[in-house]
Image: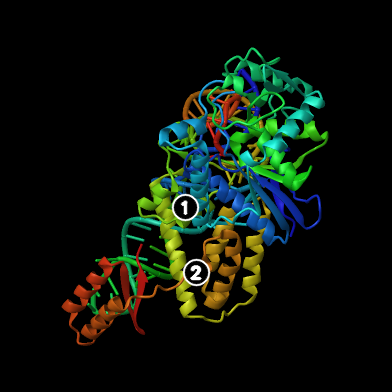
RNA sequence: GGUGCUGUGCCUGAGCGGUUAGGGAGCGGUCUGCAAAACCGUUUUACGUCGGUUCAAAUCCGAUCGGCACCUCCA
């Protein structure tokens, strides 16, 4: 089946063809590690994970590179404002290096909890300063960048296709620009490739450079590292939708200005998770983390399930009500799977399984249409004709993309103590001592064990 | 000012001209000694508003009223 993906470059869903048959070079913009990731950030990583898993399901060998931005960023292009790493450093009384290390670890904890497959390679910006400098020098040599007072700027007017991705009119950028004026720039739309120390005397993270001690601009790291590990041409580059107009636009300018040819074939962007019709933002403070959800009694995978309910190019409204709905659906699914494991049945209609497989794949192939894929899943889950054996096989197979952990869905082991209580209650029931039986059931329920009496005896479930 | 997205039943969320989206919640039922678990069924002008095209529109066109994002670090 032909996989189709939406390309921001063309604003169309198009057939996906890798540069090299059977192989995909994938680059996803990684986290800036100066704070915890919020659930909005994580939605994008879940989307990218679905993409990665889908590519692999469609038999592509995926080389997946992700950066860790552990260099400070200024708040504006005007070389002023605060450096985020420095701010965090002050706030937590740790060195910027320790801040970065700590939040990188936290990021991967979250990603693991969400069953996000690790990239085949992750790389830190601070470990690739040389590569960035080489690229900056190359841009200067190519006549696309210039040096002023130890700062290096990319000259936007020298790159005619600058707005190819954002589809904005270059002249309109000036009008609404809210960026402060930087007198050193030849054109206010130019952006920084290298900041010299002279503008930031107390910068802790800094490196030698031909232009002065300092640190790289915001965008150069992705261009540099992506190229170092994936080469001069990349199949797919992803990020959040907010990256279209600035970060990715600048990345294209740098990379293509440096190489002199097209750099990325397919650009893909995940929409925002919105909270009360406002976006979730780190800089605005007060954002929701995965830990925040877990503290409220949710599991990370409930959030993953919630993300699966909406298409990645649609905004998803976050609310605890919506998360609760996802949790309920997920737990129902889990119980279903567990019951199949304990009661395998042959189906009456084996042809149906093929039909479901096809429909699920069609949804994936259509630009990762997870809502449709999930509706196919639920149809299969409720289709008794399929038989629990086939249903279980389907779910296990689909889980390579969904990442819900179907293999691990299992009936919990009860401790000997709890087991004794269950037995005691069964005896009470046998003697028709309902009062005692109900009391024991309540007691077990307090410990999260739900009992269900059926014709073939008493069964139990974990209650969430 | 520019670019783009968006307005669907109680909530969420698909839909891209004609056939049931799906999930949650609620309600009803099955099972049960009872039962909060499980399962089954169900909610008969849902598509911002006003026009238009069409045999047929949530889906196309026009107008209009909202909401949001990006153009500054942010997924």
Q: Residues within 10 Å of mark 2 (few under 14, many from 20)?
A: few
Neighbor class of circle 1 (other Cα within 10 Å; few <14, some 14-19, many 20+) is many
- Helix, strand or loop at label 1? It is helix
Q: CA distance from mark 2 to mark 1?
A: 18 Å
Please identify the quarter of the rendering in which residue A91 is found.
top left
Q: Which residue is mark 1?
A: A303
| Relative to A254, residue A149 above or below | above
Look at the image and tell me in which quarter the C terminus of chain A lies.
bottom left
Q: Chain of mark 2?
A: A
Residue at which label 2 appears: A408
* Residue A145 pos. (x, y %): 75, 23
- Let me know if residue A78 appears in the view: no
Q: Residue at x 47, y 52 (%)?
A: A303
Colour treatment of the image: rainbow
Quarter of the image containing the N terminus of chain A? bottom right
**C-beta proximity under 8 Å, tags 2 and 1:** no
Comparing A70 with A313, the one in front is A70
- Residue B5 to residue A367: above or below: above
Residue drawn at point x = 55 percent, y = 20 percent: A80
Give how far across and how far down residue B11 sits, in percent: 42, 45
Give A447 or A125, whichever is nearer the viewer.
Answer: A125
- As drawn, the residue found furthest toward the bottom would be A431
Residue A400: image quadrant is bottom right
Sequence-first disc among 2 and 1: 1
Q: Residue at x 16, y 77 (%)?
A: A435
**Which of these two is toward me, A81 or A169?**
A81
Task: Confirm whether residue A10 shows in the render.
Answer: yes
């Amino acid at each position: 089946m032909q996989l189709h993906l939406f390309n921001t470059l063309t604003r169309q869903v198009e057939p996906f063809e890798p540069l090299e048959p059977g192989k995909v070079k994938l680059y996803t913009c990684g986290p800036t590690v100066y704070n915890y990731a919020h659930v909005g950030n994580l939605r994008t990583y879940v989307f990218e994970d679905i993409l990665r898993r889908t590519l692999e399901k469609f038999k592509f060998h995926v080389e997946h590179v992700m950066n860790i931005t552990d260099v400070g960023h200024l708040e504006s292009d005007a070389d002023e404002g605060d450096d985020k790493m420095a701010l965090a450093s002050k706030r937590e009384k740790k060195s910027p290096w320790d801040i970065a290390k700590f939040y990188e670890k936290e990021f991967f904890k979250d990603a693991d909890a969400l069953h996000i497959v690790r990239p085949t390679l992750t790389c830190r910006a601070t470990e690739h300063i040389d590569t960035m400098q080489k690229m900056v020098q190359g841009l200067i040599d190519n006549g696309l960048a210039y040096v002023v007072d130890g700062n290096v700027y990319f000259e936007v007017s020298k790159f005619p296709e600058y707005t190819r991705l954002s589809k904005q009119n270059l002249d309109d950028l000036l009008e609404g620009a809210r960026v402060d004026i930087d007198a050193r720039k030849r054109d206010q739309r130019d952006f920084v490739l290298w900041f010299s120390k002279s503008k930031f005397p107390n910068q802790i993270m800094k490196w030698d450079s031909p232009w002065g001690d300092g640190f790289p601009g915001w965008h150069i790291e992705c261009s540099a590292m992506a190229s170092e590990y994936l080469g001069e041409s990349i199949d797919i580059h992803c990020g959040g939708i907010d990256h279209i107009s600035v970060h990715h636009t600048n990345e294209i300018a740098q990379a293509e200005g440096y190489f002199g040819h097209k750099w990325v074939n397919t650009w893909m962007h995940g929409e925002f998770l919105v909270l009360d019709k406002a976006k979730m933002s780190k800089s605005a403070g007060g954002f929701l983390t995965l830990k925040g959800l877990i503290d409220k009694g949710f599991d990370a995978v409930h959030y993953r399930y919630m993300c699966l309910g909406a298409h990645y190019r649609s905004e998803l409204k976050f609310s605890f009500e919506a998360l609760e709905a996802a949790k309920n659906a997920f737990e129902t699914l889990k119980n279903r799977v567990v019951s199949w494991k304990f009661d395998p049945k042959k189906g009456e209609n084996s042809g149906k399984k093929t039909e479901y497989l096809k429909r699920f794949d069609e949804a994936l192939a259509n630009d990762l249409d997870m809502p449709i894929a999930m509706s196919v899943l639920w149809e299969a889950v409720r289709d008794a004709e399929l038989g629990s054996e086939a249903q279980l096989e389907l779910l296990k197979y689909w889980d390579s993309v969904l990442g819900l952990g179907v293999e691990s869905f299992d009936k919990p082991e009860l401790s000997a103590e709890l087991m004794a209580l269950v037995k005691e209650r069964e005896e009470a029931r046998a003697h028709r001592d309902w009062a005692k039986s109900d009391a024991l059931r309540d007691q077990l329920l307090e410990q999260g064990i739900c009992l269900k009496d059926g014709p073939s005896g008493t069964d139990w479930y974990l209650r969430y």
